[in-house]
Image (cartoon, grey):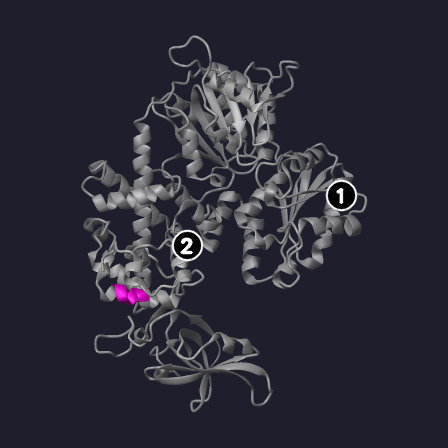
Amino acid sequence: MRPEDTVEQHFTRLHPDQKRALRKLGIGTIRDLLYHFPARYEAAGPAGTVSGIAPGADVTLIGTIRKPETKKSWKSRRPMAEAWFEDSTGKIKLRWFNQPYIAKTLHEGQVVKVAGRVTGSAEAPYIANPDIDRAAVAPEDVHETLFTHASGKSIDTLYPVYPESQGISSLWFFHALRKVFEAHAHEQLEDPIPSEILERYRLPSLQSALVWIHAPRKTDDAQTARKRFAFEEIFALQLAVQKRRREIVEEKALPVAVDRAALRSFIDSFPFPPTRAQTRAIDAIVTDFEKAHPMLRLLEGDVGSGKTAVAAATSYLVATSTPPGRIAGTLQVAYLVPTEILAKQHFSTFVSYFRDHPIPIGLVTGNECRVFPSKVRYEESAKISKAAFRKRILDGTIPIVIGTHALIERSLAFKHLAYAIIDEQHRFGTVHRQKLVTKDTVAPHLLSMSATPIPRTLALTIYGDLDLTVLDEMPAGRKPIRTEVLAKDRREEAYARVREELAQGRQAYVICPRIDEPDPTKELALQAKSVKAEAERLKKEVFPTATIGILHSKMKPAEKEASMQAFAGGLVDILVATSVVEVGVNVPNATVILIEGAERFGLSQLHQLRGRVIRSTHQAYCFALPESSGQTTHERMKAFKEAKDGFELAEYDLALRGAGELAGSRQWGVSDIAMEALKNIRMVEAARTEAARLLDADPKLAKHPVLASRARGAGASLHLE
């Protein structure tokens, strides 16, 4: 058995559903199997066998089912399922009260893993309502496991629980890996981490770590192995992003003519003075424009901190620069945003900034193309055909183009693309970034922007190829939002505030977790309020004189547009919506937001929603209305209310719920074990330092072929390759 062999070569009795499950989990080779790590561990009982258990013990056992049947309990006559569980040391009874159907799912001789608490007396013990893991495992594999000494004696240990898919269970992985280890396949893998780095950070070798993570004798073994594999993945990611950055730095960028006097004049035309943070950000970007290689910069700023103004100011410099070797024409800007609503909003904002400057601006979405100014009326934009729009982009007569995913379609080609701006970077992922950056033969300057605060560890890893600039000030006159967390019996306080704001001519948002009413057969789902039902209830019972609109992702684009226009124009008093309003929706007259089912949203998402009502100098209010009242909900809502800014909340969310809540591990192709490592800033910085040191000595990783392959895989997961 070799690491490069396919799993099907050595596990010939796989059922079709098991093969599908393995493909879904991304497991094709023996190496993939070895790198499929447990998600957690269960205690396997005093000895992991029937003979070693006693009443009151929590146990995990592997063995065979005997005589499953449906019965009634002796005293209460409750229906139940019952079976004997047998291993090589003895047998014990299993009982599932009020679940007689379980007996029909078991059969004589079936190999299972059971986990539960031993009940009854010492003379007649049984396991009550155990969890049961069914898997197609050969009976001869059951009683010899990784948890057995060479002497054959069982040991106290932990049972690994793996990420599963329908058809493949932890029990199957448990025994499959035993065969892999017995064949010594793990010993044939070459360690990608250089030995001197392992020694420097006291990390185990690859061979030791594989044994410790799949078959730990104690918790410390598993933790040490997970630390090693977390470092390995973060190290590979760092190599990928730093190698990519070094390659881009060697590329040429179109030179931008930096006229600081003209830039100051343009900024002075804004309807507000820039903050010091905005000035610092603009200066950093302008300095990058003066370099021969492309800028790679991430601009982070809390909701309402003025990122769009920074984008407009720096776009002005590009759109007033002449292409090299030309006496006419301008360089071009592509501004990519995640939603049609946001694209149109940014288009309107840019039009207002550029109204006194003769620079055409284009808008492209999946539904329409527009250009400003109109040939008929200068102060307005005009709708044009996609063919005409593409022609004007190709010949360079539209210097600034704002759009959704339509902006990165192959059919849309730029003549002199010099500056690419990506708004809400986390909603696109690096694959979209790469498509935009590579739309021309010369690499454009890149500015990624995010209103979703990103913890430092995540920024250093996922965005490790970007320089970081933070907007840490709010425009003058903005008042802090007053945030309250209200239990169900205090809901009227939120409604009273909404009535007061409506009486002053203001508007309100009500955010719901669902669009439609849930399936009434699912009891837990009934708690989650839906947009449609809540809008009807508010109109009938709470705000009968208010005009109420709705907005959600299932509406047609024209319906969304009409709903947003009505709200922005003041024709709708209360907008009941899903989190579709989370990003970028800008209605300065909206001063209060109610968030139903607040505990169902990540903290960073809650912060984004709250940011919808910090668009003016009016006092704004946010009411979080959680449906549950557990300890975790209490802690998260307390953090939401008290955190000074979004960055503090993001760090808390990372610690509590993991980086997948912030960036989406599936989106990035980063494993759960690496995502957990992002909570450890020292590990991330160590991996970053070691990656830089190694690339300084071996830029192409020619002396480290295994590590080069690992880095290519990491780069592919981030779409850098």
Point out the image quarter for the N terminus.
bottom left
Closer-to-camera residue (113/601): 113
Image mark count: 2
Tell me which amino acid carries mark 1. Glu
Q: Earlier in the sequence, mark 2 or mark 1?
A: 2
Main SS, magenta residues: helix
Q: Is residue 268 magenta?
A: no
The reply, left or right, for residue 660 in relation to residue 557 is left
Q: Is residue 238 visible?
A: yes
* Res 382 → quadrant: top right
Q: Which residue is mark 2?
A: 24
Closer-to-camera residue (399/683): 399
Q: Is residue 173 above or below residue 287?
A: below
Callout 2: helix, strand or loop? helix
The reply, left or right, for residue 685 in relation to residue 494 is left
Residue drawn at 56 percent across, 24 percent down: 386
Callout 1: helix, strand or loop? helix
Q: Is residue 704 above or below residue 396?
A: below
Instruction: Identify the mark at residue 500; answer none if there is no mark.
Output: 1
Q: Position of residue 110 (x, y in %)?
A: 40, 76
Image: magenta residue range = 176-180
